[in-house]
Amino acid sequence: MPNLLDIITDPNPILRKVSVPVDPKEINTPAFQALCDDMSLTMVERDGVGLAAPQIGRNIRLIVVTDHGKPVCMINPTIIKPSWSKEWGEEGCLSVPNKYGQVRRHKRLHCRFVDRDGNERTIAASGLMARVIQHEIDHLDGVLFTDKAKDIKEFEPVHSQEEE
Ligand code: ZN
């Protein structure tokens, strides 16, 4: 059974480190496969659309993103062919609770990565998927969306009084 992982939050210094590539030999080990399952579960349970390994305390180049409601693990992801055109859109982050802001991102891109079966893949992404990939790869380089955002809104943490 996969485990729900703790998500670390800003200003934890782990979030500011540049993560190291995953050794391809490591991918088919039970420990790495379990990490993929745990990160996928954690993303889904926390209502995220993406999760990067530094967010669960590991400085390795691994992200999970939602593709049509299904978690996809991307190992050593790199952006290729980013579109010239960019657009603003609202972002938040599980590691930066209660903050939202507008971030300008490439509208379209291709992403090359190794999947959890060890196969090299390239996918085309646009819209939300392209935005999520850029946000998650930023995490691998120690960058948070608040470094790039404008109009950052901060909300008081919600305590559900009615349940008490
Ligand atoms: Zn994030």
Image (spheres, helix red, strand yellow):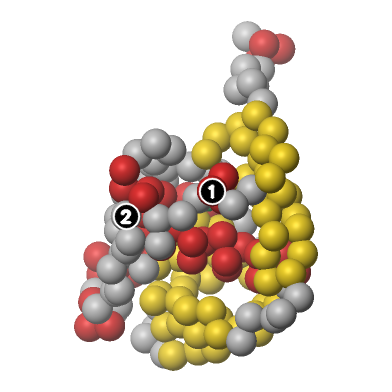
Residues packed near mark 1 inside 10 Å, few (<14), some (14 to 19) or many (20 plus): few
Q: Position of residue 63 (x, y in %)?
A: 46, 65
**Placement of the N terminus among the 4 image quadrants:** bottom left
The residue at the point 76 percent across, 58 percent down is 88
Is residue 40 visible in the rendered structure shown here? no
Mark 2 residue CB less than 8 A from any atom of ligand 1: no
The residue at the point 32 percent across, 63 percent down is 19
Is residue 92 visible in the rendered structure shown here? yes
Find disc 1 in the rendering and name its residue. Answer: 147
Q: Secondary structure at mark 1?
A: helix
The residue at the point 53 percent across, 79 percent down is 79
Most foreground residue, 105 or 159: 105
**Placement of the C terminus among the 4 image quadrants:** top right
Q: Quadrant of residue 10?
A: top left
- Asked if labels 2 and 1 touch by Cβ distance under 8 angstroms, the answer is no
Q: Kindly identify which numbered label has been placed on residue 43.
A: none
Find disc 2 in the rendering and name its residue. Answer: 17
Q: Is residue 73 left or right of residue 66?
A: left
Q: Position of residue 6 (x, y in %)?
A: 38, 41
